[in-house]
Image (tube, rainbow, N blue to C red):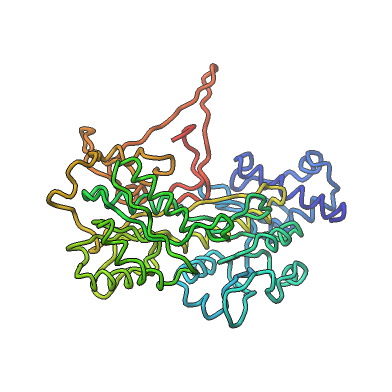
């Protein structure tokens, strides 16, 4: 970047920062000479920066009057970020699989919603064949992409090397559900460990203690550890509740059902679980079919809870499942691209979207003697179990008595009374410390609030 371009970028970031900090209110006139002195920039660089900000809609230019902060950009909950109209999609899946994948479709819907119209989406994907490394994708060169799009969003990525190369070349990169410890790119994750915790907690609250987990083999080198994270959440809930935890039915292979059909009869006869937690709802139909061959029906004999929503029903049976809003993940990814365009020096961001649990017809309260001898479970206890259990809140009545559990998102949407805390920090001179809520928050984004809650 030459010196003039660097000056223009510096002036633009200075103006955006002033608007975010409310130093420049809506409708405020921009003092160009003062801005030039504050940034040490030339008159030409300041003029160019103000012109570009006006083109982005952050400022408005009025003939013979000057340049002003545009209406709406300084309000709480909005952000003076540049519009994103062109995005590249990198994926290890081929196009047909991408369009069939429910999570990918929801993410793409969110991306399309978040883009400024008119918009353009360029796909970098294999046209056919099995899942392959993104390193072999056509047209995934930084120079080629930079000429076509403003940033890249990776869906079902399986290699951090290519994403790091693109980010270090100056292209905004956001990965969905993929992260690397040395990542130079931004990422958006779903809380998969909490999904496993919530599925197990739901069954525990129904009285089950002999709960088995069905997942894939734990591979430390796995590029997609989401199922392993879900098993960690299941184990955390079971450890807290004191339930009997059979050795997980860990299946080999790339998420196929062959091992399930082969090993489930012996596994169930040995451990006799009253409930199963499935890492993927995609296995539900096969699991229920195998249980049916053993003369077992769901939920009469065995309850079932799933850690995702790949399938929401098996025939007429509505599955109990954890759900994450991947459309929201797509919208958030576009916001991160815009943030990176506005501030290249920002360190890599890792954002998380929560799971919420949706009870269905595949789980029911356990009666009889099966739950006898198990540790009692209180609503508050489950909500406090583990540092990532914050997506469950303790519901209370107007007198403060505990009445049950609910997903945090659902409780906020319904306005349910629940336990919470609030921290206020004061300076000796009487000033109070405030925090600004993240713009990506599902409610009250950008609102100035107390020090911590």
Pinpoint residue 128: horizontal percent, then vertical percent. 59, 83
Image quadrant of residue 385?
Answer: top left
Relative to 199, 294 lies left or right:
left
- Toward the viewer: 88 or 315? 315
- Toward the viewer: 384 or 75? 384
Above or below, 263 relative to 376 = below
x 29%, y 53%: residue: 211
For the C terminus, the quadrant is top left
Relative to 190, 55 lies left or right:
right
x 76%, y 60%: residue: 169
Q: In this view, which residue lies farthest toward the left?
A: 368
Q: In this view, which residue lies farthest toward the top?
A: 428
Pinpoint residue 1: horizontal percent, then vertical percent. 84, 56
Pinpoint residue 190: horizontal percent, then vertical percent. 48, 55
**Count of labels in the image:** 0
Image quadrant of residue 135?
Answer: bottom right
Pinpoint residue 56: horizontal percent, then vertical percent. 66, 60
Relative to 138, 193 lies left or right:
left
Above or below, 283 relative to 59 = below
x 63%, y 61%: residue: 83
x 76%, y 48%: residue: 11
- Toward the viewer: 10 or 34? 10
């Amino acid at each position: 970047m030459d010196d003039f371009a660097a000056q223009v970028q510096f002036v633009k970031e200075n103006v955006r920062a002033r608007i975010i900090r409310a130093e420049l209110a809506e409708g405020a006139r921009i003092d160009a000479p003062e801005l030039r002195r504050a940034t040490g920039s030339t008159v030409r660089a300041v003029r160019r920066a103000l012109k570009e900000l006006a083109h982005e809609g952050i400022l408005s230019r009025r003939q013979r009057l000057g340049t002003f902060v545009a209406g709406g950009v300084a309000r709480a909950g909005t952000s003076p970020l540049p519009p994103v109209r062109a995005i590249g999609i990198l994926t290890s899946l081929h196009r047909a699989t991408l369009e069939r994948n429910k999570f990918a479709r929801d993410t793409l819907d969110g991306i399309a919603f978040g883009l400024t119209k008119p918009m353009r989406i360029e796909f970098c994907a294999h046209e056919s064949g099995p899942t392959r490394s993104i390193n072999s994708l056509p047209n995934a060169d930084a120079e080629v992409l930079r000429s076509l799009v403003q940033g890249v969003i990776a869906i079902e990525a399986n290699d951090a090397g290519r994403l790091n190369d693109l980010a270090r070349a100056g292209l905004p990169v956001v990965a969905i559900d993929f992260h690397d410890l040395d990542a130079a790119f931004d990422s958006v994750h779903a809380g998969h460990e909490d999904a496993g915790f919530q599925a197990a907690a739901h069954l525990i609250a129904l009285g089950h203690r002999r709960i088995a987990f069905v997942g894939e083999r734990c591979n430390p080198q796995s590029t997609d550890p989401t199922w392993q994270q879900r098993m960690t959440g299941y184990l955390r809930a079971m450890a807290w509740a004191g339930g009997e935890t059979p050795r997980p039915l860990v299946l080999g292979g790339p998420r196929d059902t062959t091992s399930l059909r082969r090993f489930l009869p012996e596994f169930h006869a040995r451990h006799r679980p009253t409930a199963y937690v499935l890492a993927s709802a995609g296995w539900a139909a096969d699991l229920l079919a195998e249980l049916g061959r053993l003369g077992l029906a769901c939920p009469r004999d065995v309850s079932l809870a799933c850690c995702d929503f790949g399938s929401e029903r098996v025939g007429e049976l509505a599955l109990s499942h954890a759900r994450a809003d991947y459309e929201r993940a797509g919208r958030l990814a576009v916001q991160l691209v815009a943030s990176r365009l506005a501030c290249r020096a920002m360190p890599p961001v890792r954002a998380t979207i929560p799971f919420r649990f949706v009870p269905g017809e595949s789980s029911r309260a356990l009666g009889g003697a099966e739950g006898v001898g198990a540790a009692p479970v209180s609503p508050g206890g489950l909500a406090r179990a583990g540092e990532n259990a914050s997506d469950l809140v303790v519901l209370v009545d107007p007198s403060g008595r505990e009445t049950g559990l609910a997903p945090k998102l659902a409780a906020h949407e319904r306005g349910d009374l629940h336990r919470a805390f609030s921290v206020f920090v004061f300076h000796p001179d009487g000033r109070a410390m405030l925090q600004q809520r993240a713009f990506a928050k599902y409610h009250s984004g950008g609102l100035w609030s107390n020090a911590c809650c």
